[in-house]
Image (cartoon, coloured by chain):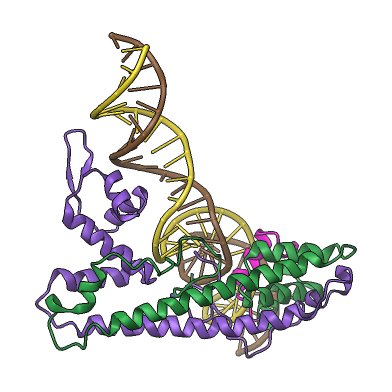
Chain colours: A purple, B green, C yellow, D brown
Amino acid sequence: MKIGELANRTGCPVETIRYYEREGLLPEPARSSANYRLYAEPHAERLRFIRHCRTLDMTLDEIRTLLDYHDRPRQPCNAVNGLIDDHLAHVEARIEQLQALREALATLRSRCQGESDSSHCGILQELAQPAPRELPAIHDEPSHVPGPHGH
Amino acid sequence: MKIGELANRTGCPVETIRYYEREGLLPEPARSSANYRLYAEPHAERLRFIRHCRTLDMTLDEIRTLLDYHDRPRQPCNAVNGLIDDHLAHVEARIEQLQALREALATLRSRCQGESDSSHCGILQELAQPAPRELPAIHDEPSHVPGPHGH
DNA sequence: CTTGACCCTGTAGTGACTACAGGGTGTGTC
DNA sequence: GACACACCCTGTAGTCACTACAGGGTCAAG
């Protein structure tokens, strides 16, 4: 199977597959006489593993760790549990931050009903004040779980 | 006031202040004879505005737009409201995604209690399957609100 | 006169891709 | 055989909002 077919089967863009190979997450596949990458079923499985992990918003580093356990199956898997637990804690912390953020934005939004011109707009006035201490400043401790703006 | 004092007063790192200037968010300040940047109170206010917006996780582009309204105050401020509303919608969408993610991670975590070695680990087995369709795949539509991994 | 804190510019790195540019390959049609 | 078109290759640069140097200048105190 060539790279395009693997991409179709897994829903992962071709460029991203090549990127995972460069990053060492996918092993280098065999090549055709024309230097095309040729994949077999184990590659597809491994790629699905990676994409599933990415859907769960793990970093490539975390995925590398999981793949290591997957590749050397004689070890106990407590570390796998620990990794998932840590990730879960990150996600929960981010949810709490975003909920605080939502409150702050809703309060801000209520400052202006849109009748006046922007020199009297309560939103712009409030933004010129320093932020209240209670807002955790979403990027203070990098939690590796993205906030509102994708990547 | 020199850049270090401005940084102290606003809690914004020196490097970031220079970065905002390069990005056109802060105007170029006066310079001392030694070519040091010299700031006055309006600069501090504008920087506090920017940092407050960043606390609310707006992009620099959104902040640029808000600063435009701030600088040309004769226009009605409906667009300000719209921008906040859009941002609020992004944040709410991200919260929902992260809550689905938390469920998926908790389910995954329950697959393994840590007694076995990793060749029988239910977590690793489940991750090798394609992700269920219900999971919205956090990066499909870039929402500009980060997920679990900071930036 | 030296130490140390501060300031300057410019460049490169972060994560996880994405988007070319510039070229080669393979299949079908005329 | 000539051409079109889809697919493949490598390598590089861009994204975002910073952060971290490298390599140098300035200034006040001791």
Along the line of sight, the residue nearer the viewer: D8 or B113: B113
Q: Residue drawn 41% across and 80% down?
A: B102
In the rendered image, the vertical position of residue B117 relative to residue B76, given as above or below: below
* C19 is higher (above) or lower (below) than A84: above
In front: B32, or A87?
A87
| Residue B112: quarter of image | bottom left
Where does the image place residue A81, in percent across and percent down from the top left? 26, 84
Q: Residue at x 36, y 70 (%)?
A: A59
- Establish if B9 lies above or below B127: below
Image coordinates for residue B121, horizontal then vertical, percent: 17, 79
- Residue A59 drawn in magenta: no
Percent across and percent down for residue A5 are: 28, 45
Q: Nearer the viewer, residue B93 or B60?
A: B93
| Bounds of the magenta segment | B11-27
User: Which quadrant would residue B138 be assigned to in this image?
Assistant: bottom left
Q: Residue at x 66, y 61 (%)?
A: B61
Residue B16: within the magenta?
A: yes
Is residue B5 visible in this depiction of the protein? yes
Q: Residue at x 81, y 77 (%)?
A: A112
